[in-house]
Amino acid sequence: MAGTTHTVTNQVPPLVQYDVFGSDRALVEAVERHLTPEAREDGLAELSALGHTCGSAQVQEWGAQANENPPRLRTHDRYGRRIDEVEFHPAWHRLLGKGVSAGLTAAWRRPGGHVRRAAAFLMWTQVEAGNCCPLSMTHAAVPALRTDPDLAARWEPRLTSTVYDRALRPAGQKPGALFGMGMTEKQGGSDVRANTTAARPLAEDGTYALTGHKWFCSAPMSDAFLVLAQAPGGLTCFLVPRVLEDGTRNVFALQRLKDKLGNRSNASAEVEFDGTWARRVGEEGSGVRTIIGMVAATRLDCVLGSAGLMRQAVAQAVHHCAHREAFGGKLVDKPLMRNVLADLALESEAATTLALRLAAAYDDGGEQERALLRIAVPAAKYWVTKRCAPVAVEASECLGGNGYVEESGMPRLVRESPLNSVWEGAGNVQALDVLRALRRDPATLDAYLREVGQARGADHRLDAAIKGVLTDLADLEGVEGRARRLTERLALVLQGSLLVRHAPPEVADAFCAGRLSGDAGTAFGTLPHTLNLASIVERAHPQP
C-alpha cells in the first residue's frame, strides 16, 4: 500500500548522453563561419567528438565528484618536512587530462586553432569550470613567453602539448607542462603597480631571488608561474618554476587555500616567496607590457567561460520545461515561460557569437583584427561576464524548487556565475581599459566601427544604437564616470551587429527589440509578445 505514494511521475529525465556541441546551433554555426574550408571538416569532427564526451554520464559524474571533493593543502609530510602540495580528487586529474588531450592548451600551433579551442573551452566549462583555470593560464602564457625567444623555445612545446603529466619534477623531463600566474597582492589587488614582492638579481644573468607574498595564485600545482615583482629597474615579469632543473623544489610556500563561493574544485592559494629562484621574462620595468598578452588571452577565456555557463544554464532550463507539465500542458508551451526561455536563449546566443568572433580575430592576426581585440575584449569581458549571474539565477528558477537543490546541478552554475566578472580585472578595470584603448590608439575605434558598420542598414534599431555610441564618444567630458554605460553600449551594439548578420531573423529581431530599442523590461521574460519566441526556444533546445 505504501508503495503507491512512491510512484514517480512528471519528473524530468537528466540531460545526459547527448552531443553538447551538435545540440548548440549557435556554436556550430559560429565554428562553421569562422573556420577555413581546409580546417572545417577536421575541426567539426573533433568538436563533435568532444561534445559527446562532455555530454556523457561518466564525464558529467567526474565534474560532480571534482566539485564535491575540493582540494586539500598539505604543507608538511609525516616527518615534518615542508612539501607544499595540494591533493586533488582523482576526478580532477581525469578532467584535466581530458582537457589537455582535447587541445585546450594547443591553440597557437594549428590552423584555426583559436576558434577550435574557443568552442572546446566553451563546452568544457559546462562539465566543470574549475579545471578550466589551469588550462586557460597555460594557453595564455604563450604570448608572454614569446617576448623572450629562448624561453619560448624551451617552454612552448610543453605548454602546447596534449599530454598531461601531474608529477612534480623538472619540466625538462616532462612531455607536457601547465602554467599558472601570480600578480595579485593583498595591498594592491588589481593595482599591480603597488606590488611589493622584491626581485634581487643573482650572479647568473637574467636570474633573480624573489621575496614576497602573493594573495591569489590559482592552480598552485602547476609546473611554472608567471609573476610580477619589483626589480631594481621597476615592475618586471618573472618565470618561477615549481621544481628546479636539479630536481630540488623551488621555495613556494603555500600559506593557505582560499575558501571560495564557487570554483571549488580548483585550488587558489596564498604563496610566500623567500629567496625563490626566478628567471626574468622581458626587460626590467616592462612587467605589465610583458604579461599583458597573457591577461588579454585569459580575459577572452572569461568571456568563453561565461558563455559556456550561460549555455548550460539555458540548456537545462529548456530541457526541463520541454518535459515538465503544469496547468494542463508542457511548461515550454506556456506563453509566459516561453518568453523567459527565449530571453535567456538570446543572452546565451549573443555571448557565444561574440566570443567566437573574438577567437577568430586571434586566428586572423591582422593589424585591424588586433586593433579590434584591444577594445572588444575588455568590452566583452565587462558585459558578457556580468550577464552570466542573472542568466544562471533565472534559469535555475525555471526549474522551480528543483533548481534550488544541489542534485539538479543548477546551484553549482549559480555559484560559479560571478567568477569570470571578478577574475582578470573586475568591471571597472575593464571599462577603464576600454577608455584607455580609445584614447591611446584611434585605430581601435576605427576597427570597431568597421566591424559593426557591416550590418548598417539591416535594422533601424541597430542603426540608431550605432549613432548613439558615436554621440557618446563625441562628448568625452567626465567620461570616466560613465565608462560602464559606454562599455555596455559598445558590447551590445557589437553583439547586435553580429546577430543581424549571422543569426536567424527571429533571433536578430528579438535581440534588437529587447536589447537595443528598449522595447522590453529589465527582467528576463519581458520581450514583446509579438516576436517569434517559439522558434528562438526551439533553437536553444538541446536534443539528447
Image (cartoon, grey):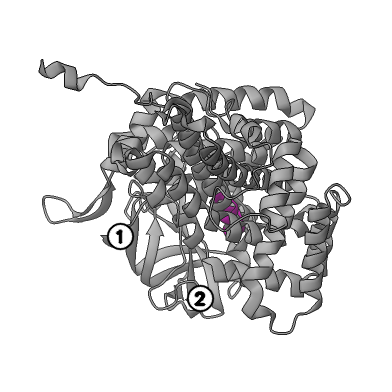
- In the rendered image, residue 533, in percent from the top left (x then y), is placed at 64, 37
Local secondary structure at mark 2:
loop
- Pick whichever, 223 or 63, lies toward us: 63
Closer to us: 89 or 197: 89
Magenta region includes residue 298:
yes
What is the three-letter code of the residue carrying label 1? Lys
Mark 1 and mark 2 lie on one chain; the one further toward the N terminus is: 2
Residue at 75%, 71% in the rendered image:
438
Give the residues drawn in magenta, as a range: 295-301
**Residue 10: where, in percent of width, then height?**
35, 24
Can residue 172 be seen here?
yes
Q: Is residue 169 visible?
A: no
Left or right, residue 505 beside residue 97: right
Distance of label 1 from label 2 (alpha carbons) = 20 Å
Question: Where residue 378 sits: x, y (%)?
Answer: 63, 61
* Residue at image coords 49%, 77%: 230
Q: Which residue shows up at 73% across the image and 84% down it?
A: 477
Q: Residues within 10 Å of mark 1 (few under 14, many from 20)?
A: some
Residue underneath mark 2: 191
Task: Identify the element where label 1 is drawn.
Answer: loop
User: Does the stretch in magenta take in 157?
Assistant: no
Q: Decide whether the magenta segment is chiefly helix, strand or loop.
A: helix
Name the spot of residue 167 as percent of width and height, x first.
34, 40
The residue at which mark 1 appears reads as 258
Q: Residue 106: which numbered mark, if any?
A: none
Q: Is residue 495 above or below residue 35?
A: below
